[in-house]
Amino acid sequence: MPAHEGHHRSYDAVIVGGGHNGLVAAAYLARAGRSVLVLERLGNTGGAAVSTRPFAGVDARLSRYSYLVSLLPKKIVRDLGLDFRVRTRNVSSYTPVERDGRPTGLLVGGGERRTREAFARLTGGEREYQAWQRFYDMTGRVAQRIFPTLTEPLPTRDELRLRVDDEEAWRVLFEEPIGAAVEDRFADDLVRGVVLTDALIGTFADAHDPSLKQNRCFLYHVIGGGTGAWDVPVGGMGALTDALATAARDAGAVLATGHEVVRIDTDGSAAEITYRTADGEGAVAARHVLVNASPQQLAVLTGDQPPTPAEGAQLKVNMLLKRLPRLRDSEVDPREAFAGTFHVAEGYQELATAHAQAAAGRLPTAPPSEIYCHSLTDPTILGPDLVEQGYQTLTLFGLHTPARLFDRDNDAVREELLKSTLAQLDAHLAEPLADCLATDADGRPCIEAKTPLDLEQDLRLPGGNIFHRELSWPYAQEGTGRWGVETRHANVLLCGAGAVRGGGVSGVPGHNAAMAVLEELGD
């Protein structure tokens, strides 16, 4: 319990919400000598970036919600002295398919020669591989130029365009639907689908959506670290937020869990934050308030009109297996296939069909999803006995399942969708996944699924949207402010995923909100 309990005490900064962005902001501000209080509604910090043991009596600590790291700048890890590491995956992806009546697939990774051979095996020639190389060379150059700007004041659109310095890349990524580029550059339906999936993670859109929200999603998925690589957090995602909490505390920040903020009153220069605990209400004063919550929650707290939520569209499934299943494609080792991203029902036409069915209010008949095995790259999340016995985790992320589909009966639709999603996976396996599932202490299969409505309930994500809102372009627009964290209240900043350049486990909004405060204070 913090020292201010029962008192009115003033802090330089009060941070509403102890997710990873709030902890980043707290650590930066406290290290700069500012007094900082973090108020977190739940009984633990971390938000969506946590590790938990979801299966009774089983020593498996899984990344329950967020699960891979790409957008976290090394600068933040260095600045805050975090005891946190990631490991790269040797395989980028494997996508199974049946061609001419036989099981085959596309393995990307394991070196240039193996990848080239995999493309030739699937497509019968060099064309698709060469197109793949040219396309991702282009996105790689864009990543190198854009990623460093995420922790700088927002550039204008023209400034960012000059920085990209590639008119073709700018047109492909920023001006025309990504579907046009995919169709122009690739001929094979499966290859097209693999490329498109990065535009659809948590984003319900068609490849040719004129809003370009699929382009913004794609951009954030290919610029991380200046390379676009998605890495495995050693110890699970909770290792990051544990390290951030330690850094904030060590710098002098006070972290108070079980404290739900219910109101923010501000005149633009000073604020009072009212919170509720199990023992009643209290209040604390602050010069600055940083809100690590959604734009909707920010509006509720400040008495403003909340914006319309952006609909979430994903199914998250966590599993523990006794062993990895064998594949119908016997030329690929399951330990390689599941080490990267294992694409299921994600051909280009399959994705278009799934989107059209969901847009019409129906569950996709072939739900697309992607899967990976954390424990192949980082076995530390499993207890020694499980490692010795060959147990493995699987994380599945389903696409094109907008929140509206679950409104009629979340529990029933969740079960129906999970069954059909796993059936799509089973079609590529030489044995049913159910035969490989571990069981918990009560004899139940070790599998849990989370819909957008579950995420809204668990984490207060409006509409179950994992980005808090539709992703934004990483440049200044009307009303975005200098850092992309400003609100209409001069001393209230948005440091959650709903800030400009938010979304994903990045710490970028937390860093930028802290920089905005320190800049104003002249530090």
Image (cartoon, helix red, strand yellow):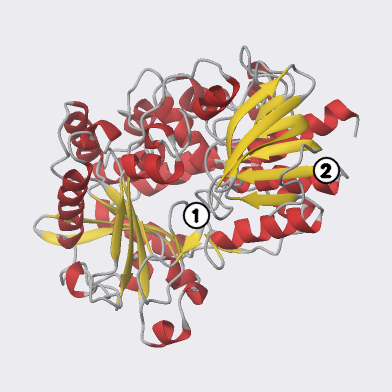
Q: Is residue 5 above or below residue 109?
A: above
Amino acid, disc 2: Ser
Residue 320, position in %: x, y?
A: 33, 70
Nearer to us in this view, 178 or 124: 178
Label 1 crowding class (10 Å Cα cut-off): few <14, some 14-19, many 20+? Answer: many
Q: Residue at x 48, y 75 (%)?
A: 379
Which residue is at the far left? 101
Q: 121 left or right of 462? A: left
Q: Residue at x 68, y 45 (%)?
A: 38
Residue 51, position in %: x, y?
A: 50, 62
| Distance CA(mark 2)–CA(mark 1) | 32 Å
Kind of element beneath mark 1: loop
- Who comes first in sequence, dot 2 or dot 1? 2
The circle drawn on residue 68 is 1
Nearer to us in this view, 353 or 48: 48
Q: 204 left or right of 99? A: right
Q: Can I make out residue 215 in this image?
A: yes
Q: Which residue is mark 2?
A: 35
Residue 152, position in %: x, y?
A: 74, 32
Q: Residue at x 41, y 46 (%)?
A: 458
Kind of element beneath mark 2: loop
Q: Residue at x 33, y 40 (%)?
A: 452
Considering the image in quadrants, where does the N terminus appear?
bottom right
Amino acid, disc 1: Leu
Q: Can I make out residue 506 in this image?
A: no
Which residue is at the far right? 522
Residue 73, position in %: x, y?
A: 67, 47
> Based on the displayed image, in which of its 4 quarters is residue 493 positioned?
top right
